[in-house]
Image (cartoon, helix red, strand yellow):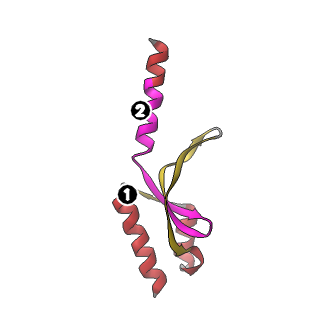
Amino acid sequence: IVVLLIALGVFLGYQWTQSHYYVGVQNGQVTIFQGVQQGIGPISLSHVYDETNVAVDQLSNYDRQQVQQTINAESLAEAQRIVRQLTDAGAQ
């Protein structure tokens, strides 16, 4: 029973992490990640959801710093909105 409860806790915890998104950088591009930035030892709790075509070096210094430090989003829709704002700001 104890092992089952631990396994259930791990499963529910992982499911919770996958309901979060953040915007960061991968391969020089603004990227939406699913999960949380933290990891458990060598185990990452996030993965790339969408690597955009927005190059980080096209952003203003302020926006570049924000993305490099990651921007948390409450949902996928919010992460996509953040990317649209960054795209619009980079186009100016």
Verify whether residue 1 appears in magenta.
no
Judge by depth and name the residue closer to the eye, 70 or 42: 42
**Residue in the image at 39% along x and 46% along y:** 19
What residue range appears in magenta?
8-32
The location of residue 15, given as percent across then percent down, is 42, 38
The crowd level at tag 1 (other Cα within 10 Å; few <14, some 14-19, many 20+) is some
Displayed quadrant of residue 18: top left
Task: Using the image, tell me which numbered label, if any, was put on residue 76.
Answer: 1
The location of residue 42, given as percent across then percent down, is 65, 40
**Residue in the image at 42% along x and 80% along y:** 88
Task: Using the image, tell me which numbered label, if any, was put on residue 12.
Answer: 2
- The type of residue carrying mark 1 is Leu
Task: Using the image, tell me which numbered label, if any, was put on residue 89.
Answer: none
Element at badge 1?
A: helix
Q: Residue furthest top?
A: 1
Disc 2/disc 1 C-alpha distance (Å): 20 Å
Compared with 79, 2 (above or below) is above
